[in-house]
Image: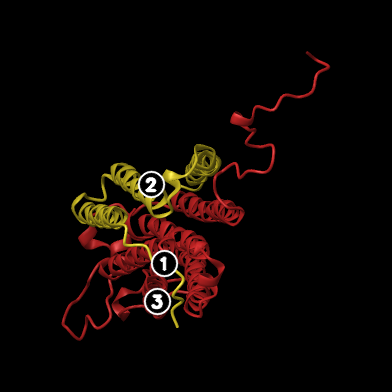
Chain colours: A yellow, B red
Amino acid sequence: MDNPQVEVQPLNRDKVRNFIKVMIYLAIITALEFLIAFTVPHDYKWLRIVVFVVMTIVKAYYIVAEFMHLGHEKKSLKMSIVLPMLFVVFLVFILIFQGSAIYNVLY
Amino acid sequence: MADSAVLVDEGKKNLWGGGVSPFKASYGKVMMWFFLLSDAFTFSALLITYGMIRFTHPSYEGAVADFKFSPEYWPIPEKVFEAFPGMHALGIESAPLVFVGLMTFILIASSVTMVLAVEAGERMDKKGVEKWMLWTIVGGLTFLGCQAWEWTHFIIGSDDSMNAIGNIVTGAGLSSNQYGPPNFAALFFFITGFHGFHVLSGVFINFVIFYQATVGILERRGHYEMVEKVGLYWHFVDLVWVFVFTFFYLV
């Protein structure tokens, strides 16, 4: 029971191509993460942590900017969502230092 | 000029003076964004708590090949998550992180089908919305099935030879587990469980919108913006998984 009055627009090929491109980026970064997980030894703990976190943030950027379309929204909306995440960065530093301090007391 | 009437420059109307949408996005979309921001804070708090508790425990020092589970130190993830359905039948002893890799790709794929549903909605393509929403739902259900299997395996535990040193523990519960310190399993259940709950509710919401698209409610409304809004929620679930994956399975 298709409504004959509704006009279906043709497929936006550029948009779809962009989504496929982002998907390939995400897949490549995930594959690289697996490669690093098995090749870089656990002795390089901080190197591993920093590399994984940077790659995760790159993936998060692509999901938020392209899939969630935030990269193409107005700057005020972008900033309203991104700037509050600074609190999270703040909490990371507080609780990682706190965890290390507890560790030093216990061991 | 202080006593004259306020001059309104029609060419440069005040964005926040009412009558226009200052973010150039609908109310529902903006509110979905702010809900997701609050949800991001919740997940951040959980994951940072994981990081803090992880840092209060010693790391395993020594060769990875000699690794044994012990409550004395935090386990190495690829030694914990190394099972794949049916791998013993195929004669494979361990498949580290393969299953979680599959789950990650399923979720990324369902995110792509979701953007294709949104794109179809922008073109008023009812059939396209139905098709891609259905694939997204299938992806979500597959992910949930994988997670159910993973939890079951994690709770029941692996072979008897993999018991903790000192006291014999098999499997995992909230108070003790065979893999490492008690907090390890407790955090695993809490964080992946909370994420899984988001996937479950996302599948329900996706189904409601799929139903509305199928019976023509959205077409009669004249736009498919609801698909875009549930799409935001679904991508957020994928986004959280990216972080859960890094902190639980890689670091």
A101 vs B173: above or below: above
Circle 3 sits in a helix, a strand or a loop, which is it? Answer: helix
Instruction: State the mark number for residue A61.
Output: 2
Is residue B154 shown to the viewer in this render?
no
SS for callout 2: helix
Say few, some or many: other residues with alpha carbon within 10 Å of mark 3 (under 14 / 14 to 19 / 20 or more): many
Tag 2: amino acid: Tyr
| Image coords of residue B164 (percent x, y) | 37, 70
Proximity of marks 3 and 2: CB atoms separated by less than 8 Å:
no
Query: Pointer 3 indicates a residue of which chain?
Result: B
Indicate whether B67 appears above or below B201: above
**Is residue A100 placed above or below B167 in the rendered structure?**
above
Q: Nearer the viewer, mark 3 or mark 1?
A: 1
Q: Are marks 1 and 2 in contact (CB under 8 Å)?
A: no
Residue of label 1: A7
Q: Which callout, 3 or 2, points to the residue nearer the camera?
A: 3
The crowd level at tag 2 (other Cα within 10 Å; few <14, some 14-19, many 20+) is: some
Circle 1 SS class: loop
Determine contact: label 3, label 1, CB under 8 Å: no
Who is closer to the viewer here, B133 or B73? Answer: B133
Instruction: Give the quadrant of residue B123.
Output: bottom left
Q: CA distance from mark 1 to mark 2?
A: 34 Å
Reading the chain from its start, which is encountered first: label 1 or label 2? 1
Chain name for mark 2? A
Taking the spot 48% from the left edge, 61% from the top edge, the residue there is B228
Circle 3: residue type: Leu
Numbered tag placed on residue B99 in the rendering: none
Give, as a three-letter code, the residue at label 1: Glu
User: What separation in Å lies between label 3 and label 2 (alpha carbons)?
Assistant: 26 Å
Residue to which mark 3 is pinned: B134
